[in-house]
Image: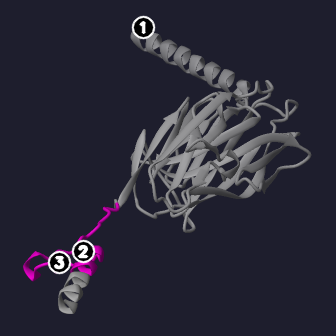
Amino acid sequence: MKKLTALLLCFLLLCTCSVTAFAAEPEAEKTNTVISVTVPDSHKITVTAENAKVFYEGVSGDSFTVERFSTPRLLIRAESGKVIKSVMLNDVDVTAELHGGYLDLDAVYEDKEITVTTEDEPVAPKDTYTVKGKVTLNGQPLSEVDLELRSTLKTTKTDKNGNFVFADVEPGEHSLTALRDGEVIGYLSFELKKDNKADVSLLEDGTYTVSIDQNGAGVELHLVLNEEAGTLAPTEIGTIEKADPNSPQTVDNTNLSWWWLLLILGATCIVVLETYRRKKKVK
């Protein structure tokens, strides 16, 4: 009887207790789960520009492909008669970060979108001046390079000695672009204004102030090209003197009396020869 009671108690205990069981995974069915992410090696910079052009490595375009984590340098240039109003980078205003027309981006790790807006350049005074000079590279004249002066577009080409001339340039904001085979190799952003003397100074935003002697007819600049930075830097400045209206003009100073003397001598010779010929014929 005692044995039967003990068996019943054990049975009831087994029915009321739970046991956690683990099933071992067969060795052949074991797998490793791998999570991977593909990282692009380049990113796209999309450009939306109103009356302006954006250049990367000397070439303008509506989009550029740059290497991931690179720090591209973009040149932003307004078209003739316009000035840059704002530059937005992924909806962030970066206008204040323009330095001499260039925008240096931080390391790029995503696609970027640049939006450039412009406005009309303020009306300039009627006075105009001559801007001329020489462009050098590594101390040597830079010949046969195309130069574009804006606001109002003016173009010229340096001669064999690197010299150039622009006439009728109005005071105000300007840019000077040097191009070789259509690619930008140098850029200068400057303001031309009248002052007590000819002078040039570099501002914090990378633009230059070129002052014209108010008694002069223009300025003469020595521009140094830095191809690596893509800049033109004025290192020397001089004044182009105005012509003196009271100075004697270039005229033909030949004494007209000599012409009359030669004419009389010629006529006399003809008369003498004709008289001699007639006398000889009569004889």
Residue type at the position of mark 3 = Ala
Residue 148 seen from this side: yes
Q: Quadrant of the C terminus?
A: top left
- Please, what is the dominant secondary structure of the magenta stretch? loop
- Quarter of the image for residue 38 reads bottom left
Earlier along the polypeptide chain: callout 1 or callout 2?
2
Can residue 31 be found in the magenta stretch?
yes
Q: Which residue is mark 1?
A: 282
Task: Decide if residue 283 is on the left or right side of residue 152.
Answer: left
Which residue is farthest left?
28
Residue 110, image quadrant: bottom left
**Which residue is found at the position 75% from the left and 30% from the top?**
128
Residue at 34%, 62% (x, y): give it. 39
In the rendered image, which residue does mark 3 sit on? 23
Tell me which segment is drawn in magenta: 11-39
Which of labels 3 and 1 is toward the front? 3
| Whole-percent x, y for residue 153 in the image | 58, 31
Q: Amino acid at mark 1?
A: Val
Q: CA distance from mark 3 to mark 1?
A: 157 Å
